[in-house]
Image (cartoon, grey):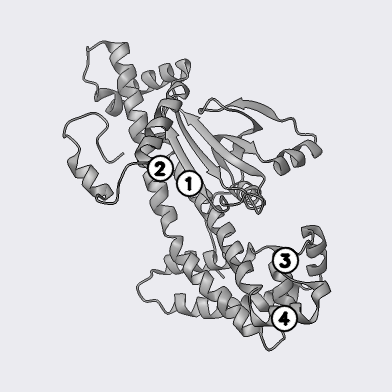
Amino acid sequence: MASTGKKLVMSLPLKLILTQDGASYFIRQNKKLLKFRLADNVEEYGVSLDKFSPGSIQRMILIDYISKIEISMPEFVSSRQEIMDMSKLTVFSMLYRQFDRQVFKDIISTEVVRKHNRINPSELLDERTKMSDATLRSALMHKESLIAEAQKQILKPVYDRIAGNDSLQPEEKNVMLLMAEKFIINLRPFSWFIILKFFRSDGAEEMLTLIRSSLMEFMEKSKVAEYIALMVMELAINSENTNLRKEARKMFKGVMDESSVIYDPEIRQKVIAELRRKNELVFISWKFGGGSTSIGAQGRLQITLYNKSDEFLEVKESIEGKKAANLKKKGLIDFYREMPEGEEGTDLG
């Protein structure tokens, strides 16, 4: 069994913007919702957290309680690992949701399910079937041993492939074993209801094979999580340094080299304190595509990073203009190579 050394509690100033279902849940729990003005100048309702369990945040994303997460800080270097972990958590959450949708689509298209639907038109198992998760969980509650057996049968060939991969270090194998298990555990109750219903039937192997195939595909896709986390951190630090340099110019009026603010701890802390006082912050937001009712947006993750709220609309218009440009003839590396040398803000960020 894979083990993990993940933090049980993380510290970051989060603003969680809630979906309608999420807001209803918190209100039922007698939790007062806060009204936030976000960096895009839109007012939204949600809750704020300074310390939180990553697992709790992920569960709320998976059940579509959170529509957006925003972090605003004057500097990110001191919270580098937490920011990267948060970014990976959001990416994995959306991959779990995408995998869940793919598996459900696959299993209801199997021959054994199609045959069941033909014979039992009053008990259809398809995307239009309405069964509450509470009802399904109650039905699955006494089938834990069968669920464990089904999980083992799905995962064994995947585990064998990982264990036999000599290019992976032991720790990497351990992480991949845990990841495979996490993808399967996060399948919706209705999918497990269907899997168990036909697990002992002749058509079960087709179903299990499709699940394994999708699992390997999504485990390969999961590599993007680390890359996105690094990109987000690099961009955040770039924006942070731009803010620090601008504020240093105002504070010291050419008395010192601007780069001193980045490398001299004492000067850096003075500038950060001034940025915090002026609320000159860097913002990162993760916006999640909705659940089954959000046609065309399911599984979408939008990450936005910008410096100040009053610059948001200008930045947005600039991005929208670039989206309409013809980018087919150039790759990102081409734009990077063509950047003028020596200009502020033209490093990797």
Q: Is residue 182 visible?
A: no
Label 4: few (<14), some (14–19) or many (≥20) C-alpha neighbours in 10 Å = some
Which residue is the site of mark 3? 190
Q: Earlier in the sequence, mark 2 or mark 4?
A: 4
The CA span between labels 4 and 1 is 38 Å
- Residue 129: give x, y in percent of width and height: 76, 64
Residue in the image at 78% along x and 73% along y? 143
Element marked by disc 2: helix
Which residue is the site of mark 1? 87
- Residue 228: give x, y in percent of width and height: 41, 49
Task: Kindly identify the amino acid type of the residue bearing the numbered disc 1.
Answer: Ser
Quadrant (top left/top right/bottom left/bottom right) for the N terminus? bottom right
Q: Are marks 2 and 1 in contact (CB under 8 Å)?
A: yes
- Residue 345: give x, y in percent of width and height: 27, 31
Which residue is the site of mark 2? 232
**Vertical placement of residue 152 versus 32, above or below:** below
Q: Earlier in the sequence, mark 2 or mark 1?
A: 1
- Foreground disc of the pair 2, 3: 3
- Residue 132: give x, y in percent of width and height: 79, 58
Element marked by disc 4: loop
Task: Kindly identify the amino acid type of the residue bearing the numbered disc 2.
Answer: Val
Label 3: few (<14), some (14–19) or many (≥20) C-alpha neighbours in 10 Å = many
Q: Is residue 252 visible?
A: yes
Which residue is the site of mark 4? 198
Q: Earlier in the sequence, mark 4 or mark 3?
A: 3
Q: Are marks 4 and 1 in contact (CB under 8 Å)?
A: no
Q: Are marks 4 and 3 in contact (CB under 8 Å)?
A: no
Q: Is residue 44 left or right of residue 28?
A: left
Along the viewing direction, whichever of 304 and 33 lies nearer the viewer: 304
Quarter residue 44 falls in: top right
